[in-house]
Amino acid sequence: MNILVVDDEVNIRKVICEYAKFEGYNVEEANDGMEAVNICKQKNFDMIVMDIMMPRLDGFSAVKEIRKFNKEVPIIMLSARGEEYDKLFGFEIGIDDYVVKPFSPKELMARINAINNRINNNQKNEKERYELDGLLIDMLGKTVQIDNKKIELTPKEYELLVYLVLNKNIALSREKILNEVWGYDFFGDDRTVDTHIKMLRNNLGKYRDKIQTVRGTGYKFEE
């Protein structure tokens, strides 16, 4: 597994790289967002760890650029800012996780390992496709269509939709959704699920009501 670590602080990059290499990952480094975008255009990575506050091009802007040509690679965002707005904005542009500095390198590696394991398990367990009237989910191509028109979802929105569909008609708690979709005991709160459900519903258009709120519990995909 190849990881790109992007941070303008050399010491932080060094620590992350040491831990990642110890876990058996191949690691490359970038000093800022501009360098990260250029590297990602030339090379494919299995995961990116990206700081927000960097010179030349900040992490948020770099993620937006990378998502223009690579919508699949998981991205973990690092930031000294823990405000809810920053976290939610990160999720909206397609990051998979948000880690606030200072952080434990062991915790970061646990998150990296969890995302890696989840991706591997999804690849083994996914069916080929799911159809419901005009809604089509191609689980091999990882695309979603409504009435033969492709809709754009962030990687996390797609994973959330697939999880709900594979567990259709079952009431799922927010905690269970966090654990299964985010791949570990999430260090956050239930609003993360609510935010992604809201974004997913907006993208599903006339099928938005298929994702029902189960009062006092969470959500379910009602077929």
Image (cartoon, helix red, strand yellow):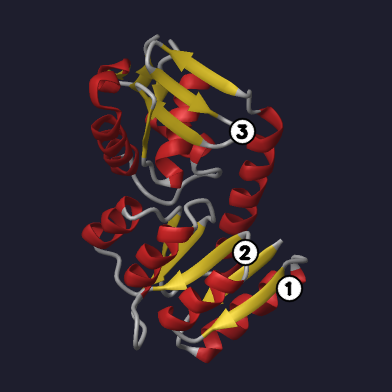
* Label 2 CA crowd tier, 10 Å (few <14, some 14–19, many 20+): some
**In front: label 1 or label 2:** 2
**Picture residue at 39% right of the left edge, 20% below the top:** 135
Kind of residue indicated by mark 1: Lys
Kind of residue indicated by mark 2: Phe
Residue farthest front in this picture: 148
Q: Classify 12 as above or below 70.
A: below
20 and 65: which is toward the camera: 65
Q: In which image quadrant can residue 56 be found? A: bottom left
Residue assigned mark 1: 21
* Image quadrant in which the C terminus is located: top left
Question: Is residue 18 left or right of 105 when viewed as pictured?
Answer: right
* Label 3 CA crowd tier, 10 Å (few <14, some 14–19, many 20+): few
Residue assigned mark 3: 140
Pick whichever of labels 1 and 2 is earlier in the sequence: 1
Residue assigned mark 2: 45
Kind of residue indicated by mark 3: Leu
Q: In which image quadrant can residue 14 be found? A: bottom right
Question: Is residue 179 left or right of 172 when viewed as pictured?
Answer: right
- Which element type, helix, strand or loop, lies under badge 3? loop
- Which element type, helix, strand or loop, lies under badge 1? helix
Pick whichever of labels 3 and 1 is earlier in the sequence: 1
> Real-space Cα distance between discs 3 and 1?
30 Å
* Image quadrant in which the N terminus is located: bottom right
